[in-house]
Amino acid sequence: MALLEVNNLGVSFVTRNGTNRAVDDVSFTVESGQITAIIGESGSGKSVACYSLLGLIPQPPGRIDSGQALFGGRDLLQLPEAELRKVRGRDIAMVFQDPMTCLNPYMTVGKQLVEPLRYHQKTPAAQARRRALELLQEVGIRDPESTIDNYPHQFSGGMRQRVMIAMALINEPQLLIADEPTTALDVTIQAQILQLIAELQRKRDIGVIFISHDLAVVADIADQIVVMQEGKIVESGDRTGIFRHARHPYTQKLLAAIPADSKAGATLSPEPLIQVRHLATWFGQGRKQEPVKAVNDVSFDIRRGEVLGVVGESGSGKSTIGRSLLRLVPVTAGQVLFDDTDVTQLKGRALKDMRRRMQIIFQDPFASLNPRMTVYDTLAEPLLLHGIENRSSVARGVLKLMDDVGLARNFVRKYPHEFSGGQRQRIAIGRALATHPEFVVADEPVSALDVTIQAQILDLMLALGREYGLTMMFISHDLAVVRHIADRILVLYRGEIVEQGTGHELFENPQQTYTRELLQSIPGRSLLQ
Amino acid sequence: MSDASITDIAQAEQGTSLWHDAWLRLRRNRLALFGLGILVLFITIALLTPWIAPYGYAEQNLDLGASGPSAAHWLGTDIFGRDLLTQIMYGGRISLAVGFIATAVALLIGVTWGAVAGYVGGRVDAVMMRLVDILYALPFMIFIVLLMVVFGRNLLLLFLAIGAVEWLTMARIMRSQVQTLRQQEFVEAAVSLGLSPSTIIRRHVIPNALGPIIVYTTLTIPSVMLLEAFLSFLGLGIQPPQTSWGLLISYGAETMEEYPWLLLFPGLALTLTLFSLNFLGDGLRDALDVRGSRD
Amino acid sequence: MWRFIAYRLLQAIPVILAVITVTFFLVRVAPGGPFDSEKAVVPEVKAALEAQYRLDQPLLTQYAAYLGDLAQGELGPSFKYPGRSVNELIAAGLPVTAELGLYALLVAMIIGGVAGIIASLKPNTAQDYLPMSAAMIGICMPSFLLGPLLVLVFGIYLDWLPVSGWGDIPGDKILPAITLGSTYAAYIARLSRAGMLEVMTQDYIRTARAKGLPEWQVVTRHALRGGLIPVVAFLGPAFAGLLSGSFVVETIFQIPGLGRFYVQAAFNRDYTMILGTTVFLSTLIVLFNLLSDILAAWMNPRLRTQFSEH
């Protein structure tokens, strides 16, 4: 018998604007000793389906319309709250996405850890603490004796996620539900946590539901895969089945969105457009403290027409480099020669003219557009500022930009909040291209988007790059994406360049340990080869 | 799709701005609308008082003395036989004026101060906000009492003194708004487009900082009116022959055993106004989706 | 943590000094001296009086002398109550005001806190609207209106409670405490509701529920602490408000406390009394602000550990 059998689950959210069917006729099973991955983009209902099993969606506005969820011979959906509470945290435990916010900041880690044990088993305090220490050791926290009484903020993100996992396992549950447990983490940490989950699952022979938006993440660990779209299951099967013989077009689209190839080497002019020499950007922290050396003595060239990828984890200084080149942060030392003009020395009129020639596209399509300006205002502003269009021709210029980035013309009077993330990013791209720049910094331009949208935006950027003859700096934490789009890649670590080369060179023959570690951490590596 | 023309724009779908959205949300909030209605009514009455008041401001009827509500005097009369409705109408002029003018003073100083500190940043910001911190720690209520004692009960001084207290919070709110906005990517994008700082402030910062400022302004007016009433009650605010709701309440409290209406009606006028402003402020806060600054 | 406290204490010193200086000069430049009103005073006597109170010396000398006295905790003699020092008057009024303030604060915290938490548990239901409407009334009904109304209803019409005095008749402390505390109860109710609502949407509350804890434990163990930090931070300003509120309440209920002394001193132009009381009350308020800030910071482990590590 299956550990968990969900049949015809339906969940709705009732709001002022009508009823939204979040989960529609969903059935799946989870076997003991297996990892079942539920894959879907935001709004696909993957999390709602799992949370509703445990009574963790607020009702109202949530409402369970139909279905049953058989677990240990009982239907979870029919259990009264008091009974369900005994299942939660004892038989079925959960790990959540963001370890920064999921632990109580006002309570020591030790106290939070023993809570499920103390509550469900009435374990004496001393014994519970011993158990907590053992588990912390098991999930890879060094020296748990001295850290167990610390508060969550004293742990790093990866360590916090380990604590979350220990907390979930402390009652030895039969089923673990992990909701995007690695999404908020750096790639190398993600790889470690994935390995840890797989290891603990095998050792305990328990069932795991692994919820993720990213097929690649579960490629190495899932036994079964369920693909959801708009509240419905579109396809499910075992891992090989899904990866080798996906039948549903949506699954195929998800698979195709995993960037698997290196960009074919293009012929580039050898002439550099930008020469960066000994660039350093430090952020002061007051007089006495040591400054944060976000970028430290970095030199490199960007050739005309090239797409230069910049890869690094959080704190590597990758965003700061891009902003330094554009004079968006004050540079501490060094030169940035743009067409032989030192950008770091420009002032006034000359700086304004230079700004026309270099633009930036940001990560967060919500924050990068002024919420009180229509598409028209946003796009017309640069056109008028730099005299690219005059008052009478500006409307035409705006529509041309909208055509270029693939936005319907009748949206021209709409405001950012009326658009989806992908559409917003198109507006932001349009704004960057409005000044006809020669150079564009793209700072994680697809990281906040759903995977299928990511692919569309990347293709759009490549196409427009060719059309406008752009030189580009593409910043990302995701090696696979960078490899797909960049001619050459810089690997950054703690503000310095560790290694550089073409995608092919880096992937086939990495020289540095850090690069190798980064490569090994790419989720779903097996798919890439 | 090659040749774009202006007519395409004419056919475009109309977007809904955040202001429009907020208005739609506010319209659904009955209490806030009720507050807005009462407020408009009271302000209109205050503006028209000299023409619509049933009696002259100084008109006495000593023979009548204090009398309860009647057909001739809807809200009764005070011990000098003066019409209470007339008194409340004239008092309301002062109370509302103090509320609005002192808030305007606070708004002007606070917003400018906060915007400059927030946008310039660095050492200027540190010095400016340190001053605000120090002033913040001062027990202002006591100081206003002191000011009133030292310089006499002067209406202009009252405006200034109250405005001087309330601008501090306004400056803090504005500064934190500007600072947050400055780090927003759309402001960075505006910098990278080459816009001048003044254009950035005008087009990108101020329109986005307006929401919290409007909400806080709406909530400052009632607290200023309370302050004035408080001082007047103690005999340190408005002084006769002028009157205000606080002063009327103070007189009413002295004779409440015999003539309770003299306390009740001015109290009702003040409370109703405060209610309206607070409901409107709360409604605006929800409608503009401003995170609680005061609570 | 100690560094934080030391830092905040250092910050308080210029504030207190500024208060003393501003008050001192403000009072001295005021038109009209304390002995002007007494027409019967012959010029010689007036001069003697002014000499006694050092009013004939240059302003800066007076200021220096005053600071010297203050350093020894000496607030000077009262102008209006000859033979009594400001210290004595404060010593007489302070216990009364402190007791009144304490009761009012208790009223505010208990009623306000409970109402706010109850309201936050079921937002947008009757359980929320009822206490929050009461809180709105509390905010819009100032103490100088509520006090007389309470007196009218409970003291005069119902004749349940005494309407004036302090500690003379049993029960005479009830109405003043409620009058003074109600506004702050209302503010605290709104603050704690907002704080709790904010916390209850946090991810770690979901974690606590996923552990299977019953709802009351989720609230008491996980939500309460974070939710009440804003309330603790508000206690400082609330204290300042209570003190100035005591001016009105002590006047209404004829309570011989500091507040009433202060208002009387203000009317009488009793300079040393105003000066002394202002300095004293201001210092008290600054210290209370400090205390509530420290308490709020201490409740936040991030701040606590940050300052102990450096």
Image (spheres, helix red, strand yellow):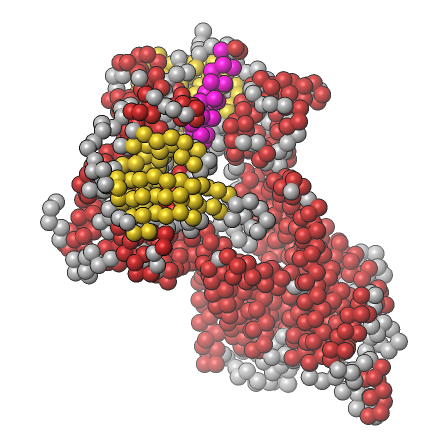
Extreme residue toward the top, this view: A1
Residue B274 counted in the magenta span: no
Determine the image quadrant of residue A350. bottom left
Q: Residue furthest right?
A: C83
Task: Name the quadrant containing residue A395.
Answer: bottom left
Q: Main secondary structure of the magenta part?
A: helix
Where does residue B174 sit, x and y in percent of width and height? 48, 58
Pick the quarter of the image with the C terminus of chain C: top right
Whether residue B147 is visible, yes or no, is yes
Q: Is residue A267 left or right of residue C7?
A: left
The spot of residue B276 in percent (x, y) is 50, 61
Q: Residue at x 69, y 81 (%)?
A: C30
Q: Residue at x 38, y 30 (%)?
A: A499
Front residue (pair B125, C279)? B125
Q: In the depicted view, which residue is nearer to us: A443 or B245?
A: A443
The quadrant in which the N terminus of chain C is found is top right
Q: Quadrant of residue C173?
A: bottom right
Nearest the camera: A253 or A459?
A: A459
Q: Is residue A19 visible?
A: no
Percent position (x, y) of residue A420? 31, 40
Residue at image coords 48%, 57%: B121
Rendered position, B210 above or below C117:
below
Horizontal side, residue B170 vs residue A349: left or right: right
Left or right of B1? Residue A117 is right
Q: How many marks?
A: 0
Q: Is residue A198 rendered magenta in the image?
A: yes
Left or right placement of residue A130 versus residue B197 in this view: right
Q: Residue at x 20, y 51 (%)?
A: A398
**Who is closer to the viewer here, C167 or B17?**
B17
Span highlighted in magenta in the image? A178-202
